[in-house]
Each structure stands twice: as C-alpha cells, then as structure tokens.
Amino acid sequence: MARENDHGKDGTDSTGAKTAADETALELLVHGVGGTTPQAMLDDPRTVRVAGDETAAMFRRAEDVDAEDRPEEYRGRPVPEAYVWCNLTSGNGSRALWLVLLPFMVVNLAHWMRPNARRRSRTVRLYGLLVRLTGLTLTVLFVAAACEVALDLTAWQCAGTAACGEQRAWLGFLSVDAHGHGGWWSQPGRRLALAGLVPTALTALLWYLSHRTWSAYESQLPLPHQPEPDNGDGGTALGKPGFWYGRRLVARLRAAHAAAGLLTVAAAVSTSAARHDRAPGGPALLDVLGWVLVGGLLTGAVAVVGVVVHRGRSENTLDTALNRAAVRALPYAALALLALSMVYAAWSRPEWRSSGRLPGDAVFGGIALVQGALVVVLAVVAKVIYRRARDPRTALRGLGGPATAMLACALGGVMTGGIAQRVADWLDGTSGLIDGPPVLLSWQASVIPPLLVVLAVLCAALAVRTARVKKREKARVAEDYHLDTRPGGTTEPGEATDTARTERIAGTRARAALTDKAPLIAGVVSAVTLLLGALAVVGAWTTGEVPGVAAEGSYPIVQGAADTAQALGSWLIGAGFILFVTWGRRAYKDPSARRTIGILWDVGTFWPRAAHPFAPPCYAERAVPDLTWRMATWTRTTGGRLILSGHSQGSVLAAAAAWQLHPAVRKRVGLLTYGSPIERLYGRWFPAHFGPAALASLHRQVDCWRNLHRRTDPIGGPIKLPGKCGPVVDHPALLDPLAYGRTERHPLPAPILGHSDYQADPVFAEERRRLLARLTPGVPRQRPESGAEPQGSSGRSSG
C-alpha cells in the first residue's frame, strides 16, 4: 500500500535526517451515535479541552496538550485528539421535548432522500418543492389539532354544554347554564377568541424554538472556500460552500410556517362567527367584515404558499443574506389578521348559541387529502428522477423519500388524533355530553388495528427469514473459525466446538442483517398507510358517522369488525399518546432514556432543515465546520499528517468534513472509518449525496481511505466501491468475537462486540499504522492573518 515520495519509508529526507514534519501526526477521533466521554475515547482519566465549548469540543490527554512542541516523543505514533459532539443531540433534559417534533424531522429527511440525478433539473427542484409543501401541511395539521382541542372540544362543546361545564369548575367563567345564559365570556365568539390563545402560543413556541436552536447550533460559519468545478466525477453537494449554512432558507420557511399557524388559528376563530353572520337576518356590517376577513385569510394563505414555493436551498455560495420582507412582514401581517379575527369573533352576538362540532371534519379531511395527493405526486417525480440514473442499491428503487414523507404524515395524524381523543375522553368520559372530536379522527384511529395486523405478518415473515439466515450462518461460523464440526471434533488444541457459542454468533449475524430489510418494512407500511388513510377519508365523508354507527344494518361480521376496529383503534391511539408522553417525561429525568432519544436524533438530525423549519436542529451545521476548521488550521500550521478516524455516525461527519476541505488539505488527510453506515444506510437512503459515484469521488480526493466492519454489526458495513477501489477501501470483515473459545491470548470468553469497540481488534492499530505510512507530510507555513482563509499546502495524490 505504500507509495513513493520525496521521503524515505523510514521518515528520512534525502540526506537521511529525520524531519520534524515527519514526526508530527494527529489522529482526530470522532465518536458515533449515543455519544461518549473524552476519557473513554482517549483511554485516559486525565483529559484537557483544547478547543470548543460545553456543547462541542476537542479534547486531548493532559500529557499530549503540547505534543506539537515535542515531535520527537511521538515518533511512529499519532497524537490522539477527540472531538466530542454528543451534547449537540443528548444534552440536558429539555431535549426530550423534541419528541413532539418527530413528524417534522421525518419529513425533513424525505427532502434529502431524493434519487441521484446526473444533472440538476426542473424535476429535481419540483421534488424539493413537493416535500416543502408536505412539511407545510404538517404545521397546519398540528395547529389545527391544537385548535380542535382548545376551541372545539373545550370552548365550543364542553363550555357550551351546561352539564359538561358543571363537571369542569375551571370552565365556569366560560360556561352557560341550562337556559343557555352565562357571563360576559360565555358568548361563543368570545369563548373561541380566548381559547385561540392556546394554539397561538403553540405557534409562537415553535417559532421561538426554531430561532433559538438556529442561534445555538446552526449559526456557525463553515470554512470559506471556493466551489470546486464540476468535472463529471460524480461529486456531492456536501462539499459546496453553502451546504452547511442554510440561514436564508430556514428564516424564510420559519416565517412562512409561523404565518401559516397564525392564519390557521384566525380561520378557526372567525369562520364560525362569519357563518353565523351570513344567516338570514344577520347584521349586515358584521357580514361584510366577515367576508373581508375571509379575503384576508385567503390572501395570506396564497402569500405563505408563494414564499414556500419561491426558492429552495442556496448551496453554491455562502449565502448570509435574508429576505427581510418575507421574514418580517409575513408573520406580522398574519398576527394582525389573527388579532382582527379575535376582535371580530368577540363582538357581541347575544342570540348566538353553540351546538354540535365546529367544522373540523372538512379541515382534517382536506389536510389528509392534500397530503395524500402530494405523496402520490412526489412518488411519480421520484421515479422519473430515478430512471435517469438507476442504482439498484437505492432504497425502494427511488421511492424512499415518498415513503418517508407518508410516514411523517401518518405520525402527525396519530399524534394529533391521539391528543384530541384523550382530551375528549378527559372532558366527557363516557357521559356522552359532547359530540367529541371530528368523525375523521375516529376513522383514522380505526385503521390502526388492520395496519398492525399487516405489520405483524411482515415481522413474522422476517423472523422466518432470520431463522433461515441463522442456519446458513452456522456453517460460515465454522468456516471462519476453522472449526471441526465432526462429532467430537476440536478446533485449536484444547478448544472444543461449542454449539451454544456457534448459535449466539450466527444469531447475532442474522439479526444484524435485518437492517438491510428496513426499506421493505418502510415501503409496506407506507403503502398500506396510504391505502387505509384514503379509505378513512372516503368513509368519513360519505357516511358522516363513526365506523361503528356507519356499519349498523350491514352484515354482522362487518358490523362486528367495525365496532372492534373503532374501539381498539381509539384505545391504541390513546395508549400510544400516553406512552409517548410517558417516554418523554422519563427521558426528561432519566439520562439513560435521554441517551436513547439522542441516538434517534443522531441519525435523524444530521441533515440541515430544508423542508421544515420546526424540525429539531441540525447538529452537523455545527460539527462539520468544527472539524473542517480544526483540520485546516492544524495541517497549515504544522504541516503534519492527519488521520480522520470516525466511528458509526462519526464516520458520516468525517466524510462530510473531508468534502468541505480545500483540495490541498484533503490530499494530506487519511480517512479511517469503522462501524460506518455511510453505504449501508446513507448510501441507500440518501443516494444523491452518498451514492456510489459520490463515495468513489471521496476515495479519489482524500489521500487514503480504509474501512473496517463486522458481520455482527447491525449499523456499519462495507463501502462497496465499484471495481478495484472496493478492496482498497474495505478491509475484509473482522472476526467477532476475536476468538471462538478459550485460548492462551483469550483465556476468558471473548465478547461479541457488534457495533462497539473496534479499537479492541489488532487490525485497527495495523490499518492506522499503514494509513500513516502512506500520508505525505507538508511544509508548515505561517499562521493565517485574521480573516484569511486557512488552506493546506499542496500534497501528492494517492496512487
């Protein structure tokens, strides 16, 4: 693997003398999902923070702080330095509240899952537009659910029913008596206006969290560099100057989504009053004002959609500008309309009485219909893009993005429906005093049992397949460890074949292979959800009754199935909501549970917020600039060699940071990845950025790259570059456990490590040594002046 250069293999120059640059080497360690401590990464209890803050920082062992001043002491070994970024995703207990933002995170992932395309086209831009519109419907859905709870169930139905109001003392000032009379706040419009403050506060909270997390996580400027020319080598957008700085788009989307939320509240507050005023004999002035407000709401809705449609991400340049007219004017205009709507609704109408439900069925049905249509069109567009550059490894043959968008809509429906169902049960119980939530929500809950049946059948099929894979893996285990499988046979002297041991190893390998079936599960669940969701909308609109009532008079088996699905679905959606809240509360107090949630965010929030501004913040917009700045400045000032060592999700960050480097610096960096999901997860689900062409380009651009993996690892895998590049990058699968039985080197049973502790394998140190031997040191230069762009000195390309 070694290559020729101006230095000898032993690190001497042409005169045989050691050079200081040859003695300087840095191993920059980047941990993976779940996080860790600098003490564990550096295997030393005494560590010192050398750069960064409490959120993300670089650490060294105390004895290595001034290692660059003593290069002769580090001859033949690199200086280890750990980048700890776990607090970006799993820090204090408030992060558990991000669970509420899960549908927003999932739809944002769908934006980045588009298939690969050889060139940017209108179809690619249309794909991004459709995902942004789907994200907008999720915001409207969440605010509409808050309006359903606060305005419809509480203020309109319960407070407007004397018996229900008597059961809830805190609703006394809003309630009416048996004759329909009450205090000043008891008029329906005033109740709606006051209750409208709840969804308004929710919208304001989402806006605040988006703005605050942007300032805390994503406001770091990336390393300044010029965009590299597109030479047709299949590069990725991850290396563009503006990829990790989406300030302009996030600000525009934040303004649009906040305005959409406020307009949704304004519509919920004012439409019932406007409908009352349009009745024969109603006040003419209020009728005119109602139509004016309706026109204003429609104009605001068009403006919101226009802002979302107008422009996507700007990646070719570092775009620090803001569209101040849209960012400021749109939310303020929506807020003004909301204030006018509240004043209009609160106008005295003594004869007005509330009965039945607010017109929520049409709203929720319309949202579900629009979401389904957007997902179907998105699937067509994704298939068109996929056909231009087919890659059989792409998840669901290019339909991974639409399937994920469908799952985001389903999550939003389950969460909002669960909230409405639980609040209705809490307010009314089994008394039947109020009509309850919209009929559509009951239909949507009723499709959950058949969906779970399909999922159970799919899991059973995968279990059978896993059992078959396990049976085949038993033979491979015997082959890998050179076991004698004959009765009474042995392996090494004193080591007997252990059937239980073989079972455990083969079972771990078989279960690890289930990760490759994730696209199948997502595709089936998404398709069944789309079909059942469409049936729920049709059933709710055609019957106007809940499933159990709609099935009355039909065949007994149909009526029994409808009653069972409705009761079980209502219980499941309520139980799911309670479990969701319980998990979030436990995670708020329990660090171990919070760590589990952090692992979910490690994978889900790697990508910038391109489709939904209220998604959890993108930690990579902080981590990638941290890594690139550190590598660029260290190589420039020392001229030394650098190994970028990434485990699991850390390998994805490492690759993203390498793409952001100046080509001269990139050519002096060796990449060591282990337990890496770069191809197994990112390459299949995000082919436009981690597809085969992009990864092959990264292999050519860095000095050298080596990847380690195990068959027992459910997350990491080989890179699988085409042609001769594959074996150059991928080391053959490491044995796990290191020893089958007890040996002189392993007197106790070696553990099955799976995804963890790759450094325990001797191959790790050997591969790191070989990478260091290949790297070419540069010549240290003077430190850059303030504001200058850090660049690396030129280095040789790898052979």
Image (cartoon, grey):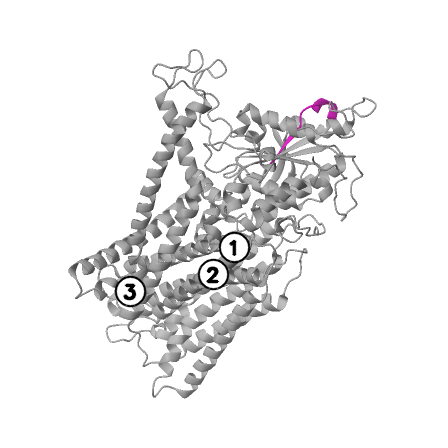
Magenta span of residues: 69-83
Q: Is residue 468 above or below residue 192?
A: above
| Residue 626 inside the magenta-drawn segment | no
Q: Position of residue 478 (x, y in %)?
A: 42, 23
- Residue placed at 66% from the left, 61% from the top? 321
Residue identifier under label 3: 436
**How packed is label 3: few (under 14 Cα within 10 Å), some, or many (20 or more)?**
many
Residue 574 in view in this figure: no
**How packed is label 1: few (under 14 Cα within 10 Å), some, or many (20 or more)?**
many
- Residue placed at 58% from the left, 36% from the top? 726
591 vs 699, nearest the viewer: 699
- Residue placed at 29% from the left, 49% from the top? 453
297 vs 750, nearest the viewer: 750
Quadrant location of the C terminus? Answer: top right
Three-letter amino acid code at the position of disc 3: Gly
- Tell which circle, 1 or 3, labels the residue nearer the N-terminal end: 1
Measure the C-alpha gap from mark 2 to mark 1: 10 Å
Three-letter amino acid code at the position of disc 2: Val
Measure the C-alpha gap from mark 3 to mark 2: 38 Å
Q: Is residue 418 above or below residue 475?
A: below
Measure the C-alpha gap from mark 1 to mark 3: 45 Å
Residue identifier under label 2: 380
Q: Which mark is residue 386?
A: 1
Horizontal relation, residue 436 to residue 552: left or right: right
| Residue 82 inside the magenta-drawn segment | yes
Residue 363 in view in this figure: yes
Q: Position of residue 78 (x, y in %)?
A: 67, 28
